[in-house]
Amino acid sequence: MASALIGRWAIMPGGDRRDKRKCRPGMGWRTPGSATGVSFVYAIQCGDFHKIGVSDDPDERCRSLQACNPYPLCVAARWRVPKGLREEIERLAHDLLHTRRARYEWFRVNLEEAQLAVDGAIELHARMRADPRLRQALKWPLDLLDDVLVEPSRPCPLSLTGRG
């Protein structure tokens, strides 16, 4: 059953209203990773700051953040992870960078430090998987870790200093 478009709203079957600006042609309400169970932990760069977060589509997330930010943003790095682990890896990376937190999910770190924090979070999950005592204590779905894949990003061309 198709949705009906009324103004900027799409009325979905069952009467659910969704903003049609978030609907992609041919994909319905899904994003690239949502159907596969794969998602991303990402680092978005804004000058001297990096936002570490999770999304099914980091490029779309960057565009949505750019809409309310006067400074240029770009996806500086992304890690493909199973959806069941993404929030845990994000939380652990935030914990590793807690002394460098600027505000919410934004940290005053360079790209290398952001990458080390996320890589460290993934490594800690791997160690917990190898140690049955940690696995029992935390009860995380560590068998999903087999599906973690680090994806290289394109170089980030944006810089607030003009040197980038």
Image (cartoon, grey):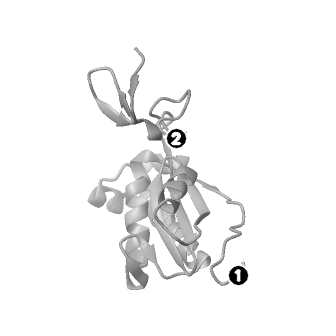
Asked whether the residues under the numbered discs 1 and 2 touch, taking CB atoms below 8 Å apart as contact, a structural biologist would say no
Q: Mark 2 points at which residue?
A: 33
Q: What residue type is labelled 1?
A: Gly
Is residue 131 something one can see in this rendering? no
Query: Residue 155, image x and y in percent?
Result: 72, 66
Closer mark to the observer between disc 1 and disc 2: 1
Vertical arrangement, residue 162 with respect to residue 41, above or below: below
Horizontally, is 159 left or right of 62 in the view?
right
Please report the residue visible at 54 percent of the width from the left and 66 percent of the height from the top: 43
For label 2, the crowd category at 10 Å Cα-Cα, with few meaning under 14, some 14 to 19 and many 20 or more, is some
Please report the residue visible at 58 percent of the width from the left and 67 percent of the height from the top: 73
Please report the residue visible at 43 percent of the width from the left and 57 percent of the height from the top: 129
- Depth check: give the residue in front, 9 or 30: 9
Q: What residue type is labelled 2?
A: Gly
- Depth check: give the residue in front, 37 or 11: 11
First in sequence: mark 1 or mark 2?
Answer: 2
Horizontally, is 88 left or right of 152 in the view?
left
- In which quarter of the view is residue 161 placed? bottom right
- In which quarter of the view is residue 63 placed? bottom right
Which image quarter holds the N terminus? Answer: top left
Is residue 122 something one can see in this rendering? yes
Horizontally, is 98 left or right of 52 in the view?
left
Spatial CA distance of label 1 from label 2 is 34 Å
Q: What element carries label 1?
A: loop
Q: Mark 1 points at which residue?
A: 162
